[in-house]
Amino acid sequence: MTISRNLSRLLLSLFTGLVAAAMILPILLTVTNSLMTEREMSFNYGLLGVVTDASAQAKFVNLKLIPDWVTLSQYAKLLDSTPRFLQMFWNSIKLVVPIVVGQTAVATLAAYAFARLRFKGRNVLFMVYLITMVLPFQVTLVPNYLMIERLGLMNTSGAVILPGVFGVFGIFMIRQFMANLPYVYTEAARMDGAGHGRIFWEIILPLTKPGLAALVILLFVDYWNMVEQPLIFLKEEFDYPLSLYLAYIQESERGVIFAASVLYMTPMVLLFLYAESDLVEGIEHSGIKG
Amino acid sequence: MEALLSSGKRNARKRIVVVIASLFIGILLVWTLFSNMMIGLTLPRVVTETPAPGSLDFNFQGTSSLQPVLEVELFNPSGEKPTEILAREGDVVQKGQLLVRYDRTAKEQQLELEQNALKKMKLGSKQLQDDFKLAARGDDAAAIEAARNAMESLKLDLSAQEKRIQMLQTELTDRTELRAPFTGRVTAILAIENIPSNGADIRLLNTERGMQFDIQIPAGMAAEWTEGDAIKVRILGKDSRLVEGRITKMEADSRKESNMPEGSDATKNPASEERQTTKEMVQVQVSMHDKSLRAGNRVQVELTQSAGGDTFVLSRKAVHQDRNGFYVFTAQSRPGPLGNQFYASKNYVTVIGEDDQRTAIAQELWNEDAEIIVESSEPLMDGQRIRF
């Protein structure tokens, strides 16, 4: 019995290890390749994507993990000679930070209302919210576009930020988190004469902190990677965020691609490392799986 | 206890992450500013100016010296020494007025001699008539013929002598005096009394035809002139004043005036890229009829011409020329990755006129907001990034 349990655990570990390796390998390759020279990359990948008879070996690329010569030249090239990257990086910051802050604030207040206030039509309204959440972006694209144009926000940061601030996902997630909080704290506070404002600010908000941390991370990742919204609502390329940067890199600049990818994912990785425990806790309590 | 340790580890890791994140953001922030500055330092530096609407007044000043239109030298007609000079330098004389008298003695003596010879020949004539009458009474035909011939011959001699005397009288009247052939002013007395002269005795200026001067004028300014037009001429000197002159002749000058100093080499400094232009010049002759004018007087012609009405005036240095015409570089701003970027944009313009410092260009071709590049640290190309 013990042997079979150990065997199944071993097999499970092997399987999860393989899955983990498959998921980590691209990230690892990206990081290590960003430290290679352009020449070494050419040797490894040949004329990747170019049809030629002379290079039959180009069909199979050499996925090399350890660079022959570690260099930061790709980063220097990226930061020095491509100011567009830096500009797009700050564009992403300018778009994502207001969305995350705004949606967190709006979601917290709305979630409190859905979770803790009793009013007529509450559940119906929440259902409507849920329905809009499951609708894909493409379905709401046209009404969104028309509304943004009417508001005169087209081709401005507001065209991306405003719909983001009033996103539904945050309300749903925090509402679920707040609904799981014990009512005894709020009842006790109410008996002591606390109003909704005080209960929200001093009882509910501190208890919702893990959920907020999880929401911040999920929102940051979601909007850091957004592609459709800036493409549709922003016409000036100078306003595009970093998520659209790879489209501007030429194939001859493979090293720059890897370096840009590493810098692109760095904020998300750092945020995850900072709030990893809160993320896990927040997702656990809200009942949402990532 | 374990939970406390775990919380401590978590906080320590959070601090490290915060430090790394701060470094990451800080490096990108510094690099953003640094890379923009570094790129900027490599760009050509330019100096710009805003074109000013207005017109360009072209000024021209040229000086010259007056010369007489007609001045003649009057020569001694007889070769005799002058006995009396009646004219003085500067005198205004009328046509036919006596200027110099010459010694008549020799001619008068010769005339007297010739007149005596005539009288003598007339006396011989009576004798020949008597001889003929005597021969006619006889029958000798040969003698009669000889007497007739002698008489006819004497008649011819008499006639010739009379003509000689007449010529001498004419000479005595005409060639012992020098008279003014036209109304004018005596500009020089070269004769000296009682001293024979071989050359000219009097220099006489025709005041009816006046004075004249030649001057080179830019062809653009003389374009509207035709022969016979009047222009104002300033007489330089103590009593400077304006006198009207009249254009008598205009012809294109084969020489051209260049704005490049002699010996200069434009290729030595390509950054300056100064445009070399040549001005077409016109040779203009102006005549003047003021009686107070003297040969050699300095005169000045001042011209002012306004180039067009609706023009923009800018520095001449800003206008360049290639085989397609005149052009200027303007500084245009475009939004760039790290703020506004400036580019040099080549714009062809219509040059209305120019002087040594400024150029007037047509206004309708111009965007008023544009800054025109006057100077640059390096030669510019269309679309090239620049900095101020």
Image (cartoon, coloured by chain):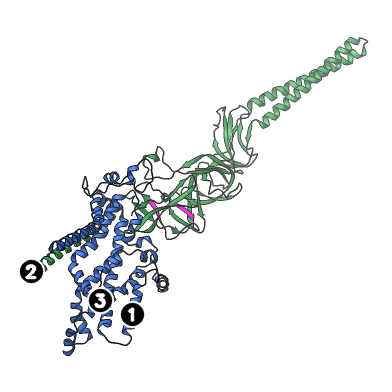
Q: Which of B221 and B43 is in front in this view?
A: B43
Q: Which amino acid does label 3 sit on?
A: Ile
Q: What stretch is highlighted in magenta?
A: B357-374
**In percent of the image, x 51 and y 54: which residue is there?**
B307
Q: Specify whether B52 is left or right of A78.
A: right
Element type at mark 3: helix
Real-space Cα separation, disc 2 to disc 1, in angstroms:
43 Å
Q: Which of A38 and B35 is in front in this view?
A: A38
Q: Where is residue B387 in the image (x, y as percent from the top left)?
A: 33, 54
Real-space Cα separation, disc 3 to disc 1, in angstroms:
15 Å
| Outermost residue toward the front in this view | A1
Which chain contains the residue that carries disc 1?
A
The chain displayed blue equals A
Real-space Cα separation, disc 3 to disc 2, in angstroms:
30 Å
The picture quadrant where one finds residue A110 is bottom left
Q: Quadrant of the N terminus of chain B?
A: bottom left
Q: Mark 2 points at which residue?
A: B2
Q: Which amino acid does label 1 sit on?
A: Met
Q: Name the residue under label 1.
A: A127
Q: Specify whether A208 is left or right of B325.
A: left
Q: What is chain B's hue in the picture? A: green
Question: How many other residues sit within 10 Å of disc 3, few (<14), some (14-19) or many (≥20)?
Answer: many
